[in-house]
Image (cartoon, rainbow, N blue to C red):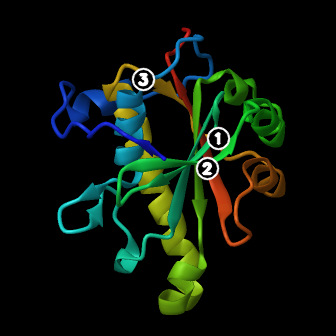
């Protein structure tokens, strides 16, 4: 387990500034992200705020999303309750394989970090039945936007990636069968 630094709750950039500056960045420098930056990005995606709620709204507070971090050191699963990362795959750099699974989009391999958002649809289906998928998809949009805006506030760039082969991403990350990948978000220092 990797205990992440506590996230900052007050930034130096306004929401309005991040909205104005947010643009997709597909080219990154080689500079690695700090654990503080990673902490902020993951907290923005699904961090715990007051009485067990999260930074992202969720229908019925059922929280169907699972967040993964992919770096050259391996694949990590984010644990919001303890604000920790559990390494699920180590050793080989999974980014080249993830790039191939993402239809050879080079930014996936080039970025020092990729945040992968997966969903467990069953967490919503028992309560919301046929509307469950809609609510999951709304929630993943909220989480992704939080990541992109947090990246801007940290002076980083990001790009939303939805074009990938689901089964290949599941294999590369060794995701449990009930977790469906929905988003890959490469994050790093923009080269442009």
Q: Is residue 164 above or below residue 99?
A: below
- In the picture of the structure, the residue carrying the numbered disc 1 is 161
Q: Residue furthest front?
A: 1
Q: Secondary structure at mark 1?
A: loop
Q: Nearer the viewer, residue 187 or 171?
A: 171
- In the picture of the structure, the residue carrying the numbered disc 3 is 34
Q: In the rendered structure, find residue 183 and report the number of the disc placed on it.
A: 2
Mark 2 or 1 closer to N-term?
1
* Circles 2 and 1: CB atoms closer than 8 Å: yes
Q: In the rendered structure, find residue 173 and report the number of the disc placed on it.
A: none
**Residue 146: image x %, image y %?**
38, 45
**Residue 171: image x %, image y %?**
81, 53
Label 3: few (<14), some (14–19) or many (≥20) C-alpha neighbours in 10 Å: few
- Which residue is at 77% across, 34% downward? 99
**Residue 70: image x %, image y %?**
62, 38
Q: Is residue 33 above or below residue 67?
A: above
Image depth: mark 3 or mark 2 in front: 3
**Residue 142: image x %, image y %?**
41, 55
Q: Is residue 15 left or right of residue 188?
A: left
Q: How many marks?
A: 3
Q: Does any portion of residue 149 appear in the rendered image?
A: no
- Which residue is at 35% across, 46% downward? 43
């Amino acid at each position: 387990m990797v205990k992440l630094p506590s996230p900052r709750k007050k930034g130096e950039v306004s929401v309005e500034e991040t909205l104005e500056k947010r643009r997709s960045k597909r080219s990154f420098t080689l500079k690695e992200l700090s654990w503080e930056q990673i902490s902020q990005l993951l907290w923005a995606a699904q961090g715990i705020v007051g009485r067990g709620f999260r930074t992202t709204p969720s229908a019925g507070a059922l929280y169907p999303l699972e967040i993964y971090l992919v770096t050259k050191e391996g694949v990590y699963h984010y644990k919001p309750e303890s604000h920790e990362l559990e390494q699920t795959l180590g050793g080989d750099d999974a980014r080249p394989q993830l790039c191939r699974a993402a239809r050879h989009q080079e930014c996936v391999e080039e970025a020092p970090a990729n945040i992968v958002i997966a969903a467990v649809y069953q967490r919503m289906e028992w309560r919301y039945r046929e509307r469950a998928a809609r609510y999951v998809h709304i929630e993943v949009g909220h989480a992704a936007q939080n990541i992109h805006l947090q990246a801007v506030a940290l002076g980083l760039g990001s790009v939303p990636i939805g074009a990938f082969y689901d089964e290949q991403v599941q294999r590369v990350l060794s995701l449990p069968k009930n977790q469906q990948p929905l988003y890959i978000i490469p994050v790093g220092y923009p080269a442009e």
